[in-house]
Image (spheres, rainbow, N blue to C red):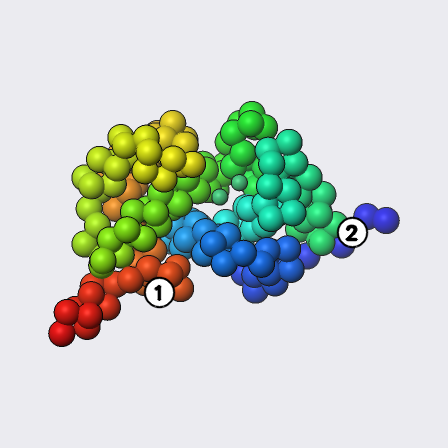
Amino acid sequence: MVPLVVEATRERAWETLNRYTKSEALLRHALAVEASVRAYARKFGQDEELWAATALLHDFDYEIHPTLDKHPQDGAPILTERGYPDWFVRAILSHANHLDLERASQLEKTLFACDELAGFVHACGLVRPTGIDGLEPKSVKKKLKQPSFAAGVHRDEVYAGAEGLGIELDDHIRNVIESMQPIASELGLRTAADAEEANA
Ligand SMILES: [Fe+2]
Ligand SMILES: [Fe+2]
């Protein structure tokens, strides 16, 4: 039976994500990437809801498929079964470098550019008393050059992502930081206000 194609709303994506993902760290990663991709949708005049839904689900199967011989390719049929449209599933597949898919749409380029960098900015925020408040691109770039810091983040993908998007790395880093700031506490990050309170 051909599944019915559903509308990829943010609400539906969140429900699908939570069905397959219990880990708080993974949920937070999804939210961080969502915030960044959503900010770019706004900047580019694209559909925020659709872009946010795609970003939310890009790693939805990582908990059940934690290795690259399965993630995200074995997750894709699950999304199709649940009625997500082909372009949506394709965008999610395209974030995985090992699948060698050309990133054709602006959404695909944006998702790829935000995935590793949002993870990295998140990691930078976790080790700072003020989280990502006051975090500057300069210090993010410095940390990118320290291989032992957040070693799981592929630096080459961070650089290639910004290039594919056609945005200067400094500007891209700043955009990602700013997009995550409003949801810092949901991401488990401290804020400048928390630090102030602790010092009072
Ligand atoms: Fe992934
Ligand atoms: Fe990811």
The tag earlier along the polypeptide, 1 or 2, is 2
- Is there any visible trace of residue 101 in the rendered image? yes
Q: How packed is label 1: few (under 14 Cα within 10 Å), some, or many (20 or more)?
A: few
- In the rendered structure, which amino acid carries the disc numbered 2? Pro
- In the rendered structure, which amino acid carries the disc numbered 1? Ser
Instruction: Give left or right: position of 163 versus 171.
Output: right
Instruction: Give left or right: position of 44 versus 5.
Output: left
Residue 107 image offset from top left, x and y in percent:
48, 42
- Is there any visible trace of residue 43 in the rendered image? no
Verify CB contact (< 8 Å) between mark 1 and mark 2.
no
Query: Judging from the image, what secondary structure is the residue with disc 1 in?
Result: loop
In the figure, 145 relative to 89: above or below?
A: above
Residue 53 image offset from top left, x and y in percent:
53, 54
Query: Judging from the image, what secondary structure is the residue with disc 2 in?
Result: loop
Instruction: Give left or right: position of 136 versus 31.
Output: left
Residue at disc 2, CB closer than 8 Å to ligand 1: no
Label 1, on which residue?
Answer: 185
Please give the label number shown on residue 3: 2
Q: Residue at x 52, y 29 (%)?
A: 97
| Pair 1/2: label in front | 1
Q: Residue at x 25, y 63 (%)?
A: 191
**Closer to us: 93 or 106:** 93
In the figure, 12 relative to 165: above or below?
A: below
Residue 28 image offset from top left, x and y in percent:
45, 56
Residue at disc 1, CB closer than 8 Å to ligand 2: no
Q: Residue furthest top?
A: 100
Residue 160 image offset from top left, x and y in percent:
38, 28
